[in-house]
Structure formats: structure tokens, C-alpha cells
Image (cartoon, rainbow, N blue to C red):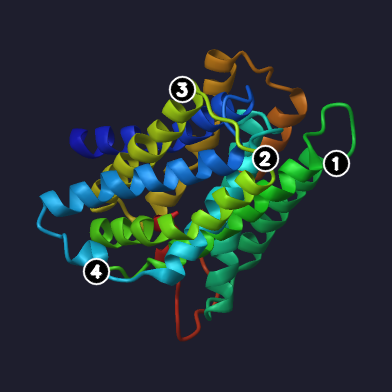
Amino acid sequence: MMRTFLLTACALGAFAANSILARLALGAGAIDASSYSSLRIVSGAVVLWLIAAASGRREAALRPEWGSAAWLCLYAVPFSFAYISLSTGTGAVLLFAAVQVTMLLAAYAGGERLSAAQWLGLGLAGGGVVYLVSPGLDAPSLTGSVLMVLAGAAWGAYSLCGRRAADPIASTAANFVYAAPLMVPVFAGAVLLDAVTLSAAGVALALASGGIASGLGYVLWYAALRHLTAGRAAIVQLLVPVMAAAGGVLILGEAASWRLVQSAAVILAGVALALRAPGGRRGRHPSRSQLSRS
């Protein structure tokens, strides 16, 4: 029990750290978004491949995973560009909401019919997002918000692609390994546009995000998932945006706006309701177990 608690806490802390590291690097202009994304993917690929190789999964970690790799890139790039303008907490709330809503809607598309309570929860979550980004003095950047929602949707799709992975560590390593070359056009575009900004601090933060918060964080999460039910795994992830927002306030000195507090409460309550409510009629392809892999 204590081992599961520690694994879960460390994994969730790593997920929250991704938002904090990105905001710390990109908000301060220590690195450009394209370079940050590229270094994050490459360092994650190196760490995960080394872990896979050390555990006898070298060949499995090199099996082509182009579809999942593409979704991983489509998550990483908008995520980085979004954090140029979004606060840590706002970005994490939008990302989390988009991931879980995407996966719930995918469950519906896959044959699971959601109950009235689940639709109510989705409606609350959607309303919270609309309120968060609605015009006003405290409203976050609309461009950044749209980019983060796109990143969340891509991460949800990436998670769904890997739901049947027989060996999660090897599969995740392969995803990062094959995502690395896909980042070449992204970085090349920044070079052509003369938009590359690199500093020692920015590079270090990107490597920490990819190699530690992403690479090691995913390994810890998969270890924890072996002892968590799908429902509990989904619910404990509600802590990620809270932890990220707290880190933004304590570490980066960001202000926690009343709008963010209110909308986060509504979004998280809606997602929790949707996840915990009894499901409706199931079709041929029930997908509730997919929610544990976000």
C-alpha cells in the first residue's frame, strides 16, 4: 500500500512538474517552444530507451510506433507554445480537462453509452472551460488556451492508442524514439524563421522535462497502475492541475486568480462526476478502462 502511494505521488508530481518546467522555461523566454519540444522528446527517448535496454526490452523499444509517435508530437508542440502565454495552473487545468473529455467521448464513440450523470459531468467540465477562457480582465490568452486544449486532445488520443500495449515501458520508449525524427521539421522551421532561442537554463529545463518528468515519470506511473483500479487512477489525476497550480504560485510566484479557482473547481467536479458516475448502456467495445492511461 505504501509503495503504491509513493509511486503514485511521485508520478503525479512528475506530471505536474512538466507544466512547471515548461512555464519556467518558456514564460521567461529562456528557450523557444520548438527547441523545448524537440529537446523534451529527444531526452525522453534517450532515457526511456536506456531503461528499456537495461530491462531486456531493447528490441521491443525499437519496434515502429509511428501512429502513437505522431500523436505524441501533436501533444508536445502545442503544449510548449501554449505555455508561452498561459500560467502554470491555467495550462494544467485546460490540459487535464481536454485529456479526460477526449477519452470519455472516445469511450462513447467506441460503443459505451454515457449515463445522464456522465453527460452532466461533461457539461460542467465544458462550462468551466468556457468560463475560464471567456472575455474579461482575468481571462487567459485565447490562443494559448486553444493550443492547450489541442494538446490535451492529442494526449488523450495518444493514451488511447497505447491502451492495449502488452509492455507499456517498451511501448512508451518506442513512441518517444520514433517521435524524435518527427520533431526535425519543427526545429528546422524555427531555424528557417530565425526563431531559435537557446540558453543553458532553457536547455537544462527541457532536458529535465523530457528525461526526468516525462521519461521517469511515465515509468513510475505504469508501476503504480498495476495496483490501481481504472476509476482510482482516473480520479487521482484530478490532483495534477492542483499540484501544478500550487507549484506555479509557490515556485514561480504566479497569482492564483479567482476565475481560475472557480473554473478549476467546476471543471474538476464535472470530470470527477463523469468518471465516477455509473455508466450507461455499453456497446461492443467498452472503454472505461482506457481512462487509466492519461
Contact (Cβ within 8 Å) of mark 1 with mark 4 = no
Residue 47, percent from left and from top: 27, 44
Which is more N-terminal, label 3 or label 1? 1
Which is more N-terminal, label 3 or label 2? 2
Disc sitting over residue 134 in the figure: 1
* Element at label 2: loop
User: Which residue: 57% across, 46% down?
Assistant: 96
Residue assigned mark 4: 166
Which is more N-terminal, label 4 or label 2? 4
C-alpha distance separating marks 2 and 4 = 43 Å
* Element at label 4: loop
Crowding at label 2, few (<14), some or many (≥20) Cα neighbours within 10 Å?
few
Q: In which quarter of the image is residue 12?
A: top left
* Element at label 1: loop
* Element at label 3: helix
Q: In which quarter of the image is residue 92?
A: top right
Which is more N-terminal, label 4 or label 3? 4
Disc sitting over residue 186 in the figure: none
Contact (Cβ within 8 Å) of mark 2 with mark 4 = no
Crowding at label 4, few (<14), some or many (≥20) Cα neighbours within 10 Å?
few
Is 176 above or below relative to 28? below
Q: Quadrant of residue 114?
A: bottom right
User: Which residue: 68% across, 21% down?
Assistant: 256
Residue assigned mark 2: 194
C-alpha distance separating marks 2 and 3 = 19 Å
C-alpha distance separating marks 1 and 3 = 37 Å
Which is more N-terminal, label 4 or label 1? 1
Residue assigned mark 3: 200
> For the residue marked with disc 3, what is the amino acid?
Ala
